[in-house]
Amino acid sequence: MLRTAIIGLALAAASGTAAAQTSPTPQSRFAGACSNYAGSDLPNDEVLASIIATGSPSWSAPLVRAYNATLAGVSTPTNPNLADQFLPGNGTWDSLLREIHSDEFPEQTQRRTDQIQISRRTRGLDAQAWVRAYLGGEVGLITVHCPLAKPDEPATSAPRRLIITGDIAGLSAARLDQRTFGTISYTNDRVASTESFNVDVVLGLGVFDIGAARVVPYLSYERESLSSSPVNDLTLGATGFWQRDFHEVRWNAAYETDDEFDSSMWMADVEWEPAPIRACTQRIGRAGMFQCEYGLRLDYSYVEDPGSKASLANVENYLRAGGWLGLSYGQPLWRGWFEARLRYALMEPLTGEEGDVARGEVNLTLSPRETSNYEFGIGYVNGEDLTSLVRSETIKVFLGIRY
């Protein structure tokens, strides 16, 4: 909470200065904050702080508390959020947000490199209801994408933060609602007729700028214990990504072992996620949203020591090619956000016969809102683990966490 308040104080000054020097367009309101996030999406807390700064308010203790309550998506009589405490009397915020709600701004940013891009998700709400929803905690309704620094201007690195997600690809997602969840789950293994508590999480250790690309060192841990073929993967690696016009190229190099350091495996891969076709983002009804993602993958793995991983006992190395497809549908439900997700991945060996993987996963989840840090869900998984090649068929009830 203290960190977000400090961000707000700093951005109030930066955004106010930028707005005074440029024409009062919605884009100009975010110029000061974007100086620290060249080429990436502005985090939700800084978008909100920049909007608040348009009214040049005094960052009083009640305003800071309401700002933090909005980010947390809560409001109580003793700790109201911005919508409940300040919206009725603040025409500046209301005017700016109504302008962003207008048809001038698209549902998705185009990620051009020469100007600030703003997109908003209206969810079928009229302007008044949408403004109240945003200031009430649905801060994922607005996305601000910052331009790359000009060649004669030095780029400023974004603040480094711990990232918690469910897969390596999630480390490149600037927006929280695009990031997958790390999970703690209660799992029923239908193959071995056993039950267990399991964990699957990726920790990003900050984003480092290297030229036009960004690199994230990470630690990941996946553990499924009481099953017919246990999964025990502890991975230390670094992934990089390059984004342009909705295309994303990711590369990764990693060392994988287990929590007893018994096995040893070296891996490298490259993924390309193309720009989505128009049909991949569709509004359904007043507030539903269908989305899809897909991509291609090429990877190489060298098994130095399989340890106790039986699935790698006869594998020395493999070179594979394949891809994935993900489909999702989300909509408001019970004052929260319901989402159904389907993902299928296929990898085929280019050398030898080892390393082929076919894995399908279906999840039904419920969270307080689209940009929540946690969710609850039930899922079904059938297929091989991407790296350890362990086959499983499980039903799980899980708590998802992301940050």
Image (tube, rainbow, N blue to C red):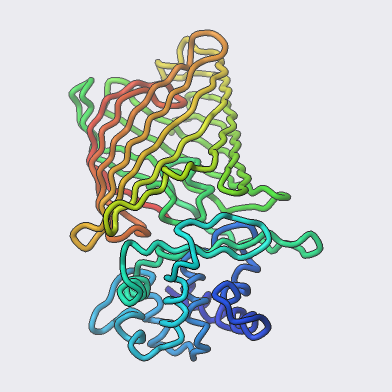
The image quarter containing residue 258 is top left
Q: Is residue 69 visible?
A: no
Q: Is residue 174 above or below residue 309?
A: below
Work out which quarter of the rendered image holds the C terminus and state it.
bottom left
Could you say which is closer to the camera, residue 318 or residue 108?
Answer: 108
Q: Is residue 275 above or below residue 61?
A: above
Residue under the image location 64 percent in, 83 percent down? 17
Q: Is residue 14 visible?
A: yes
Q: In screen coordinates, is 7 left or right of 282?
A: right
Residue under the image location 63 percent in, 66 percent down? 36
Find the residue positioned furthest to the front: 103
Residue under the image location 18 percent in, 23 percent down? 193
Q: Position of residue 364 (x, y in %)?
A: 25, 43
Q: Position of residue 217 (x, y in %)?
A: 58, 45
Q: Position of residue 40 (x, y in %)?
A: 59, 57
Residue under the image location 32 percent in, 21 percent down? 229
Could you say which is closer to the camera, residue 213 or residue 254?
Answer: 213
Find the residue positioned furthest to the right: 152
Work out which quarter of the rendered image holds the N terminus and state it.
bottom left
Could you say which is closer to the camera, residue 333 or residue 395?
Answer: 333
The image quarter containing residue 253 is top right
Q: Is residue 220 above or below residue 389?
A: below
Q: Position of residue 24 (x, y in %)?
A: 59, 81
Counting every numbered tag in the picture gives 0
Q: Is residue 327 above or below residue 37?
A: above
